[in-house]
C-alpha cells in the first residue's frame, strides 16, 4: 500500500464531463488526517504509520489513548487506522494528510462497513427462489426448501445458505475511478457506489490490482 487516507461518506450525486455525459459519483470527505505514530522494523517488527481522523472532545478519551495522543503532540482523534507504506521516511508524526494525495484519473480501492440488515431469510440474503404458492407448500413460501440428501450423509453440508445476520461487515470495492478532487474542501468524487451509509467511515487507498 503506497498511500491511503481516512474519510467520511457524504452521499451520491452526479457530475457532467466535457462531453456532457453523466457520471454517478460518491463524495467522500477525505481528511484532514494527522500522523499519530510511526512504526519501525527496529521497534515493532514492521514499518507503518498510524493515522487519526475526526476530532474528539478530551472528556471522551480514555487515559491510555490520551497519553498516546499527548506523546505525539496531536489533537485527540475519533478514528485510528494503520497503513503499511513502502517508504515512511517522508512522513513524520504530526504531518497532515489531505485529499490532494490523490488526483483525478487514479484508480483506488475503498473499504468500509456495509449497512446492517439484521436477521434475514435466504431469499433476501442469498437470492433463493420462492417455493410454489399452491399445492400444499405453504404456509411460508420463502423458506429455504430442501436441505439436501436423505439418510446419507444425514446432515447439511457446510456452506449451505441459511437465514442469519446480514450486512454490517467490512466490504472492499476495488478499482474505482477518482473523477474529481476538491482540494479546498477536502472532497474526493469517486465513480459509482461505495460501502456503508451516509457519514460512514471509509478508507481510500491506491488500487492494488490496477
Image (cartoon, rainbow, N blue to C red):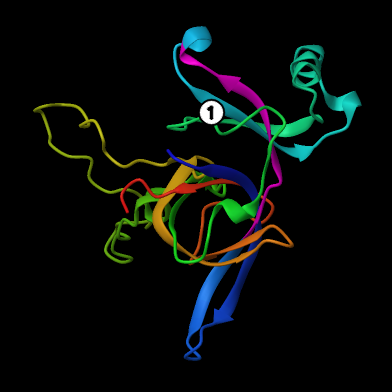
Whether residue 201 is visible, yes or no, is no
Local crowd size for mark 1, using a 10 Å CA cut-off: few (<14), some (14–19), many (≥20): few
Residue at 51% across / 11% down in the picture?
A: 44
Residue pushed farthest front?
A: 90
The image position of residue 17, as x and y in percent, is 51, 83
Q: Secondary structure at mark 1?
A: loop
Residue at 34% across / 57% down in the picture?
A: 127
Residue pushed farthest top?
A: 43
The image position of residue 91, as x and y in percent, is 59, 32
Highlighted range, magenta: 28-41
Horizontal arrangement in the rendering, residue 205 relative to residue 31 (left or right): left
Residue pushed farthest right?
A: 59
Of 48 and 53, the residue lying toward us? 48
Say which residue label 1 marks.
Answer: 89
Q: Please, is residue 165 above or below residue 136 in the view?
A: above
Q: Which quadrant of the figure has residue 161?
A: top left
Horizontal arrangement in the rendering, residue 185 relative to residue 80 (left or right): right
The image position of residue 45, as x and y in percent, is 45, 11
Q: Is 196 one of the magenta-colored residues?
A: no
Majority secondary structure of magenta residues: strand
Q: Please, is residue 210 above or below residue 93 in the view?
A: below
The quadrant of the rendering that contains the C terminus is: bottom left
Residue at 20% across / 32% down in the picture?
A: 157
Q: Tell how many labels.
A: 1
Q: Is 31 one of the magenta-colored residues?
A: yes
The image position of residue 110, as x and y in percent, is 49, 50
Horizontal arrangement in the rendering, residue 26 relative to residue 147 (left or right): right
The quadrant of the rendering that contains the N terminus is: top left
Residue at 31% across / 56% down in the picture?
A: 128
Q: Which quadrant of the figure has residue 79?
A: top right
Amino acid at each position: 500500500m503506497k498511500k491511503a487516507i481516512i474519510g467520511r461518506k457524504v452521499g451520491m450525486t452526479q457530475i457532467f464531463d466535457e462531453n456532457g455525459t453523466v457520471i454517478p459519483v460518491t463524495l467522500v470527505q477525505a481528511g484532514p488526517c494527522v500522523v499519530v505514530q510511526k512504526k519501525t522494523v527496529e521497534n515493532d517488527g514492521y514499518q507503518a504509520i498510524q493515522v487519526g481522523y475526526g476530532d474528539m472532545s478530551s472528556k471522551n478519551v480514555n487515559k491510555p489513548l490520551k497519553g498516546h495522543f499527548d506523546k505525539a503532540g496531536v489533537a485527540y482523534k475519533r478514528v485510528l487506522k494503520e497503513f503499511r507504506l513502502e517508504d515512511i521516511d517522508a512522513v513524520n508524526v504530526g504531518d497532515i494528510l489531505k485529499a490532494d494525495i490523490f488526483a483525478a484519473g487514479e484508480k483506488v480501492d475503498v473499504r468500509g462497513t456495509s449497512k446492517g440488515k439484521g436477521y434475514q431469510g435466504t431469499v433476501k440474503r442469498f437470492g433463493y427462489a420462492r417455493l410454489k404458492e399452491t399445492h400444499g407448500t405453504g404456509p411460508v413460501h420463502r423458506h429455504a426448501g430442501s436441505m439436501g440428501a436423505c439418510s446419507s450423509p444425514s446432515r447439511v453440508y457446510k456452506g449451505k445458505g441459511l437465514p442469519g445476520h446480514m450486512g454490517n461487515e467490512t466490504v472492499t470495492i476495488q478499482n474505482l475511478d477518482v473523477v474529481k478532487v476538491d482540494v479546498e474542501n477536502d472532497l474526493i468524487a469517486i465513480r459509482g457506489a461505495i460501502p456503508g451509509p451516509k457519514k460512514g467511515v471509509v478508507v481510500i487507498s491506491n488500487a492494488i490490482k490496477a
